[in-house]
Image (cartoon, helix red, strand yellow):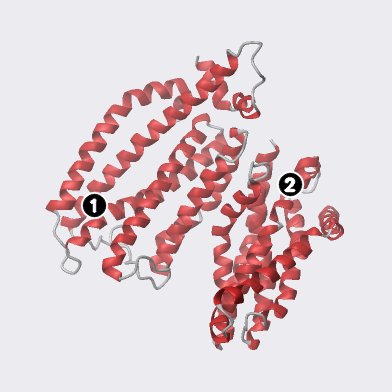
Amino acid sequence: MAGFLGLFRRDLRLALRQGGDTGLVLAFFVLAVVLFPFGVGPEAEVLARVAAGILWVAALLAALLSLDRLFQPDYEDGGLDLIALSPLPLELAVLAKCAAHWVATGLPLALVSPALAFVVDLDPRAIATLVASLLIGTPALSLVGGVAAALTLGARRQGALLSLLVLPLYVPPLIFGAGAVEASALGTGARVDLLLLAALTMAALPLCPWASAAALRQALE
Amino acid sequence: MISRLANPARFMRLSAALLPWCAWATLAVTALGLYLALFAAPADYQQGEAVRIMYVHVPAAWMALNVYLFVAVASAVALVWRHPLAEIAARSAASIGAAFTFVCLTTGSLWGRPMWGAWWVWDARLTSVLVLFFLYLGYIGLVNGFDDPARGGRAGSVLALVGVVNLPIIKFSVDWWNTLHQPASVLRLGKPTIALSMLTPLLVMALGFTLLFATLLLLRMRAELNERKALALRLNTRPATAPPPTRAEAAAPAHPGGAAIRQAR
């Protein structure tokens, strides 16, 4: 437990001190969302129809940006070897790193999203669902992204390869997350979509660290 | 038997003997299947002659799924038992599977345009097969994305196993969701609902495609093994004044297949 918390705190401290990740992710999120009214026109009806999807896709792409820094710095300077050799199981180490990644990227995304809801004319009664869906869904994004980051460690074009691998796997959270917000905006219940999204996150919690640890062991051979 | 096949030299001899039979059988069975599909099979009462696309679309879809299963099983064998040829088999099969998936998607699109009025719909079956196609592309990108081919092979093995979860989703997508794509008519509980006159060409074409897969797999595996042998030879007979090997070349002999090849020589 001490090892888990220590690794979590270390990663969080690194993310906050180096500052790059959170700022970059938020800036990209805002810019990507702001681009859409320029692209599809400023009519409120058109934007409101696609607002849920725009916000979720932009959040997803923003979460993608910081993934290659999840394991790469430790892999390069040898810290990953030490983490793998420590008494803490590698699966829990991955969980700690993904949790720190989520606090540094997914959580800010969820908290900033209400401000952006006005940019894309999202129905105000869906804002609470938007925040809830992002809070529930972004941990799944961090976990699944961790698997792809572990698989592409040391690859020649890690960024592009990571995106190619992770985007098909991001489709289920996107469908249920955007579906929840859309259902809330239309007035039908968002409960089913939110529950399925929570189920995806719950399933990812044990399975993704296991797959990531297997991939990391292959990388460290 | 699997461990008897682990020796690459023995595999090369066996595949050299097997390959002509596979190739001729592929030609014969596919020719028979195409004759049955295009001429002997009846036209559909609703779709007319356009139903004959089914005899390419459905076997291609079956192959797309089964080849992914083959890749996943070979990856599991490579990870667990370190069988030297398993990784080569997975790597070789992936491109063939991606091609079958592409054929399935395009023939489906060509069939959907006259039947459904749309080139593409976002229903569960089509979406999950598209995800399968992206999984194939991701796998191929991953195994070729590293300077060290052994590292690429290992990473790809893990990815192949992670992606297996998509296979039941594809198979049962027509049952779990309200889809435009028709439900299962052949592989289902109870009798197949398809008429025998249509089932026979379908099964013959499926056999032809399987033989095609076997032929292409053997060809690609032989090519891969020859390439590794050539690389190992180049490294071992390099003169003293030659420039130092690139990182990719130096990493190649570290592969267990390379050691086995040198042993077999």
Q: Do the residues at discs 2 and 1 belong to one chain?
A: no
Residue A158 percent across, percent down from the top left: 65, 47
- Whether residue B20 is visible to the viewer of this picture, yes or no, is yes
Q: Residue furthest top?
A: B240
Crowd tier of the residue under label 1, counting other residues whose Cα lies within 10 Å: few below 14, some 14–19, many 20 or above: many
Q: Chain of mark 1?
A: B
* Left or right placement of residue B187 versus residue A143 in this view: left
Crowd tier of the residue under label 2, counting other residues whose Cα lies within 10 Å: few below 14, some 14–19, many 20 or above: some
Is the residue under label 1 in contact with that under label 2 (CB below 8 Å)? no
Residue B162 percent across, percent down from the top left: 56, 51
Residue placed at 25% from the left, 57% from the top? B53
* Left or right placement of residue A105 versus residue B54 in this view: right
Real-space CA distance between mark 2 and mark 1, rounded to the nearest whole angstrom: 49 Å
Residue B141 percent across, percent down from the top left: 54, 44
* Left or right placement of residue B94 versus residue B258 in this view: left
- Give the total number of marks visible in the rendering: 2
User: Element type at marker 1?
Assistant: helix
Amino acid of disc 2: Gln
Residue placed at 54% from the left, 70% from the top? A175
Q: Chain of mark 2?
A: A
Q: Nearer the viewer, mark 2 or mark 1?
A: 2
Amino acid of disc 1: Leu
In front here: B185 or A61?
A61
Residue placed at 55% from the left, 76% from the top? A40
Q: Which residue is mark 1?
A: B202
User: Element type at marker 2?
Assistant: helix
Residue A162 percent across, percent down from the top left: 62, 51
Q: Which residue is mark 2?
A: A72
In front here: B147 or B37?
B147
Look at the image and tell me in which quarter the N terminus of chain B lies.
top left
Circle on res. B156: none
In front here: A25 or A10?
A25
